[in-house]
Amino acid sequence: SSGINAELEYSNSVNATKQLTEAVFQQYTTFQPNEELQHDIISEIKKRKEELYKQQRETIMSEVSLSTQRQIELLSEKGASIWLSTLPLKACGYVLNKQEFFDALSLRYNLTLSTANRSPLCV
C-alpha cells in the first residue's frame, strides 16, 4: 500500500511539474505556464487521490466491526477533532483537568476509563 502511495505521489509530482520541467530542459529564459492546463492537471491529481482514499476506506470498513465502522464515520466528520486544538480559555469553559481530558478521550474513542488511565496519551 505504501509503495502504491509512493508511486502515485511520484507520478503526481511529475505531472504537476511537467510544464516547468519542459521549460528547464528547453532552457527557456522566460516561463509562462498554461494556467488552464495546470488547473486541469491539479484537478486530475486530486480526483485520483480521492479515488485511492475512497478505495482504502472501503477496504478498511469491510474489515472492521459495525461499531468500529460507526466510530470511524463519527471521527471522520468535519470538525470532529477541533476540541483537541481549541485554546484552553477558562472564561469559555474550554479548560479540562486531567480527569476530564481522559473522560473525553474515553467517550470519544470508546475506551474504558481504566484503559485510558493506564496508558495516558499526554500528561
Image (cartoon, rainbow, N blue to C red):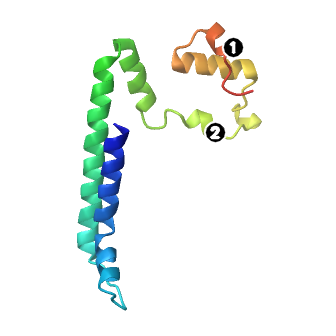
The quarter in which the C terminus is drawn is top right
The image shows a total of numbered marks equal to: 2
- For marks 1 and 2, give the CA distance: 22 Å
**Residue at horizontal 61 percent and vertical 21 percent from the top:** 104
Q: Residues within 10 Å of mark 2 (few under 14, many from 20)?
A: few
Instruction: Tell me if residue 121 comes above or below residue 23 in the rendering.
Output: above
- The residue that disc 1 covers is 117
> Could you tell me residue 69's position as x and y percent?
36, 19
Q: Residues within 10 Å of mark 1 (few under 14, many from 20)?
A: some
For residue 92, which quarter of the picture? top right
> Could you tell me residue 19's position as x and y percent?
29, 75
Residue lying at the far bottom of the rendered structure: 29
Considering depth in this image, is 102 or 37 the residue closer to the camera?
37
Considering depth in this image, is 27 or 48 the residue closer to the camera?
27
Label 2: state its secondary structure.
loop
**Residue at horizontal 24 percent and vertical 72 percent from the top:** 36
For residue 22, which quarter of the picture? bottom left
The quarter in which the N terminus is drawn is top left
**Residue at horizontal 34 percent and vertical 87 percent from the top:** 27
Instruction: Tell me if residue 27 comes above or below residue 82 in the rendering.
Output: below
Residue type, label 2: Thr
Instruction: Tell me if residue 95 comes above or below residue 69 in the rendering.
Output: below
Label 1: state its secondary structure.
helix
Which is in the foreground here, disc 1 or disc 2? 1
CB-based contact (under 8 Å), mark 1 and mark 2:
no
**Residue at horizontal 29 percent and vertical 70 percent from the top:** 18
**Mark closer to the chain start, 1 or 2:** 2
Tell me the tag on residue 86.
2
Tell me the tag on residue 6.
none
